[in-house]
Image: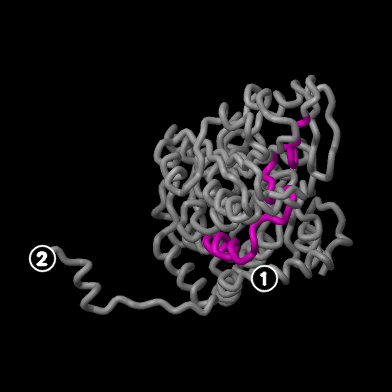
Amino acid sequence: MATTKRHDVKDLSLTPEGVRRIEWADRQMPVLAAIRERFESEQPLAGYRISACLHVTTETANLARTLKAGGADVVLCASNPLSTQDDVAAALVDAYDIAVFAIKGEDNDTYYSHIEAAVDHKPQLTMDDGADVIGVLHSARREQLGDIIAGTEETTTGVIRLKALERDGALGFPVIAVNDADTKHLFDNRYGTGQSTIDGIIRATNVLLAGKRFVISGYGWVGRGVALRAKGMGAHVIVTETEPMRALEAVMDGYEVLPMEKAAPIGDLFCTATGDKSVIRREHVERMKDGAILANTGHFNVEIDIPALRQLAKETREARAFVDEFTLEDGRRIYLIADGRLVNLSAAEGHPALVMDMSFANQALSAEYAIQHAAELERKVYPVPSEIDREIARLKLDTMGVAIDQLTEEQAKYLASWDEGT
């Protein structure tokens, strides 16, 4: 069915391939499929406009389909210039009648024009992966803030920005931090990003990880996941951290922990996963060995100081698709994957659908919750309600064929009491 909605995608002739891949992902997303079936019947989002700024992937397509099934009028734009899957964008427009503004490799002006298009939708609910839509609304479109019931945020970087807004008393509407749900960050960030980051690095470079010194900056849930997978493939993992407890945990997990200054000369591969800027700086690049490979799996491409890398280079060329080679004055070559953008989506396909099933179930149910509780929510960053988290975990176990025990009445009473000792 051809859409009459506005859109800006690369090529609508890619639709058939996009549909096939969306359907493939859907078979790995049974929790979201169950929610979509209920939404079709109950229409909890009927009449609401949703502007979503997310990675335009097969998994996101199934979230958009679920929101539409619930009655929402959805507009989707990309949350990163390199993460869009063009066949998926085409299929959403041409086969599923959802407005999409996203083209893989779009320049900065086009990227922000697409965000503006999503804001032009005059949303009542927002969905962000990095808080870009919320950022535009709080800067250039403040007159629209009063029309918005709530938003959701998918990633650590976005939650950090939103909590800063809240601390300054500047947050214009309530936001549910989907990233902080246990069924999101414990699985998506650790298992999803762990696997897909390694996938992106290998697809881009075809290097053997076994025997390499693999430096991971940041030991949050993403860093833990990447470290686990790199170690499993035979790499010698080195962790850099600024937070003492996380550094201690990395040591106790069996990894070498060094400051970046000392890791820089010995690392073969570097992957940033901090959510902060200038984690790998000029002074670090100056100390790196010939052939060092740099990648980032954080949301924005600011974790590696790319301007400094360009200043140090006497020559730059494309060594492989998504790999740039920087030749320094002394002849050393440093390689940067995907312009420092999140490597798992820029050079690969992002998280496995089985993991995103839980993340996007949180998005869908949080949107429903926000509408149901709009009158009670203040201009704060809220966690996903624990009952939603538990229900998603229960549904996921059911779809995996895993049964668990239930507390007996006696056990429940014991856990709730104080007067029964040894």
State the separation of the CA atoms marked 2 and 1.
Answer: 50 Å
Tell me if 92 is positioned left or right of 194 in this view.
Answer: right
Q: Which residues are magenta?
A: 333-362
Q: Nearer the viewer, residue 268 or 358?
A: 268
2 vs 1, front mark = 2
The answer to whether residue 10 is above or below residue 421 is: above
Q: Looking at the image, which residue is at 84% across and 39% down?
A: 319
Q: Looking at the image, which residue is at 55% across and 75% down?
A: 38
* Quadrant of the rendering where the N terminus is positioned: bottom right
Q: Which residue in the structure is indicated by mark 2? A: 419
Please report whichever mark, 2 or 1, sits nearer to the chain's N-terminal start.
1
Q: Nearer the viewer, residue 25 or 228?
A: 228
* Quadrant of the rendering where the C terminus is positioned: bottom left
Q: Nearer the viewer, residue 145 or 99?
A: 99
Residue 26 bears which disc, if any? 1
In percent of width and height, residue 268 lies at 67, 38
Colouring style: one colour
